[in-house]
Image (spheres, rainbow, N blue to C red):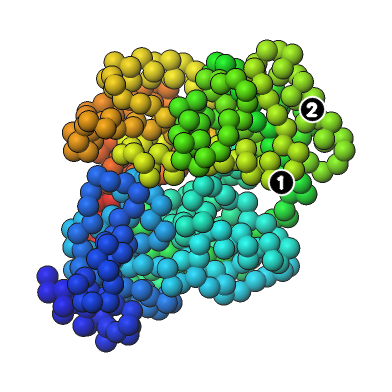
Amino acid sequence: MDFTKTKTELGKLIGEKKVIQKNDGTMDDALFDSYGTDRTKVYPPNYQVLVFPESTEDVATIVSYAYQNGISIVPSGGRTGYAGGAVAKDGEIVISMSKMNQVMDFDPFLGTLHIQAGMITKNLHKEAEERGFYFPVDFAATGSSHIGGNIATNAGGVRVVRYGLIRDWILGLTVVTGKGEVFRFNGEILKNNTGYDLKHLFIGSEGTLGIITEAVVKLTKPPKDIRVIFLAVPEYKNILEIFKETHNFDLPLLAFEFLTDYCLDKVKEHLGVPDPFQAPSKYYVLMEFEVNNETDEEKLYSILESITEKELITDGSIAQNSRQNETFWKYREGISESLSLAYTVHKNDISLPLRNMEAFLGEMTALLSQKYQGFSIALFGHIGDGNLHLNIVKPKDLSDEEFFKQCKQVDPEMFQLIQKFKGSISAEHGIGLLKKDYLGFSRSQGELDTMKAIKLAFDPKGILNPGKVL
């Protein structure tokens, strides 16, 4: 491909300042490369042309040009993914959505915000709060992820147990298909029973059906007050018993998270936070509740008292203010950063029915002990919705290439276990490049054939995020 020609022609179509070619003196090489990758380390970026559209019309123009010239495209958001979904490794054009970050409209009656897809998730939270509303989808990467990427991966995060996935908060979408067509799925009304609701095909599609350029998100009222309980738990089976115990109290549960002692040690090492308790424990649980009155305060202490009396914990503490809430959350939300910045990690993001979780973990632990001798295992997740993050940490004396080779050999055995216990090989990180070969463990052949047909309908030349998912 003549990349200089591509840059010149795109510059004429959308403006020269919006198009950058590698080594043209506009951008440092390391920064340039970063737009073509995510948090995975398996595939290095390999591309030459980077564009910064500022509108849906810009994106449509770029995709139309790519369609006419048979050039592949990789959409780039906050690049916080762990499945290789934002990697440009084969000379694709990378479309960064970072300049598409504006609020386009606000409806105070319906309680919605119409925003561009490049808005950072944390900024969306702020925009909602300034208008007296609340956007409840939250996770560790909100400070850098884009709302468009969240939608493209159907992100969940820490409060799924109360608020559901991001799919539940999307009222309207604007997307550009693989032919450069613009589809606007109505977000101005709640009721629209006019056939297939096509926007749901694009939620979770990882940029393989179309590029999400705008979204109308639903908002809700903010919780009146939030309180966090942090617990030291000696055995994994106790975690599930504690979760069941929360159902016995009429108190809104916002989040139910867990982590192992290994994860806690890495967070303390990286963030310099103190031990939460005097004595160490094998597992830790974080519970977050909405508190509206003094009666709810009493229920918090009743929960702690009940699980203590049943000897489900060895220690526990209720945060007394927002600062303590934040401190407790650091133990959980600091895990991914603490691992990713200091180590090479092979990540598995899986989900299982809670009733099958203990049996699965028993068999999985035996498998990992046999296959990953000498490797460290970091286990944490959103236990309230059955989502486990299983991280294999590379030993220092092993090369990245050999490490990922060994992990790839063991993954199918793990996925067979997940299939046996009726789970999913990807709970929220998506399929991307890294899990596409294993999609059959969670999808039937009929489903895969239908997905391929849908892909062909929206992206007939296969130029959108090629090699991802299917």
Name which quarter of the figure residue 360 lies in: top left
Vertical position of residue 20 compared to residue 257: above or below: below
Residue 44, can we see it? yes
Name which quarter of the figure residue 464 lies in: bottom left
- For the N terminus, give its image quadrant: bottom left
> Tag 2: residue type?
Tyr
Q: Which residue is mark 1?
A: 322
Residue beneath the point at 39% across and 49% down: 81
Q: Which residue is mark 2?
A: 301
Mark 2 nearby-residue class (10 Å; few <14, some 14–19, many ≥20): few
> Tag 1: residue type?
Ser
- Nearer to us in this view, 337 or 223: 337
State how many labels appear: 2
**Circles 1 and 2: CB atoms closer than 8 Å:** no
Disc 1 vs disc 2: which is toward the camera?
A: 1
Vertical position of residue 269 compared to residue 48: above or below: above
